[in-house]
Image (cartoon, rainbow, N blue to C red):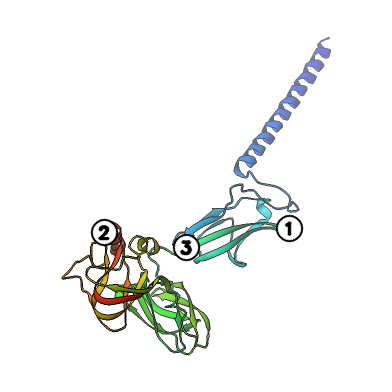
Amino acid sequence: MNKTMKQYKGKVLKAMMMLLAVSFALAGTSTLSSCSSDDEPYFTVSEDDDPRILNTDLADSKIDRKTNYKMEIKVTPVHYTTVTWLLDGTQIYEGTTIDQTLPVGNHELKIVATTTKGKSTSRTLKVTVTPAADDPALGTNAIELWVAPGAETTIHKCKNLGTVTKVMVGGKEVDFEVLEEGTALKLAPTGLENGDYDITLVDGEGNQFFGGTIKVTTEPRPSMENTLWEGEFSVTWGTPFEALKDTFLSKVKAGTILRVYVDGNGQGTATTAWWNNILTGKGDPERNDFMVTGPATWEFELTDLSIQLLTEQNGFLLVGDGYTVKKVTIE
């Protein structure tokens, strides 16, 4: 009996030890599985798996030239996948996290995930990179960007030209001069045949900035004038030209070129309805009337002050005495 009991107890103890060993093994497996999941949530064991880009928030973006483009890509199988970044078809980076500046322009950014077995998948985004606020830029007046071969032209309404050390037209360095405190650029695109050429501005650090396109041609510059009024109207001190008094302001803005074609013998100028000069706001005798002694063209480049004066002082007139208005245009 005692012998039988001892054998029974031995079997029970052995069974309990086996159960305990299995429990420890299962606990260990669970722990290892948990650690793998926490540390490597996208871990897969096979390099034969198809690659996947797991990001769900990829979107087109817009940044300025000085702001880094930043993005992290999550892929699987993580240990067997390489991520490459192509900007307009050219590789610019390799790795899962990009953090760098991009050139100015409208770009196509392609993100490609490729496994060691040569399998790949990709995502394509649009990235717009704008000039920084302090980057140099040229005006866009089409007339100023139209020049005869070997001739000079001056481009107005530019900004931040103080940092420019070189100007390229069609990839060729040209002579230039910065004028009007960095707001105008005079250049001479010599040695170029008829054609359209990109202008590139280069600063002291070698950064390049697109400055638009200039047309080199033997053709005459096209007229950009828009006729607002044409006819004959005799201006006297008692009869100012009022045909555009109430409509002129709606057709112009700061930077508009106003031209008035006149003839006769007298004096006058363009004013607000209060008879104040549209450029200075001054009235007679400081109004600076033009003296008319035959056919003449008056030209005014309107400013923010001009728009303010025309708004506050009830519109546009041509005042004076002894001359005839032939035509009024804007450009």
Q: Residue furthest left?
A: 285
Q: Secondary structure at mark 2?
A: loop
Q: Secondary structure at mark 3?
A: strand
Tag 3 near tag 1, CB within 8 Å = no
Disc 3 marks a residue whose amino acid type is Thr
Q: Is residue 29 visible?
A: yes
Gap in angstroms between the C-alphas marked 3 and 1: 35 Å
Mark 3 or 1: in front is 3
The quadrant in which residue 271 appears is bottom left
Question: x and y percent of residue 100 in the render?
Answer: 50, 61
- Seen at 42% across and 75% down, the residue is 202
Residue of label 3: 130
Gap in angstroms between the C-alphas marked 1 and 2: 72 Å
Against 114, is 6 above or below? above
Q: Earlier in the sequence, mark 3 or mark 1?
A: 1
Against 172, is 257 above or below? above
Question: x and y percent of residue 90 in the render?
Answer: 60, 68
Q: Is residue 68 visible?
A: no
Question: x and y percent of residue 193 in the render?
Answer: 52, 88
Graded by Cα atoms within 10 Å as few (under 14), some (14 to 19) or many (20 or more), the crowding at tag 1 reads some
Disc 1 marks a residue whose amino acid type is Lys
Residue of label 2: 313
In the image: residue 297, left or right of residue 23: left
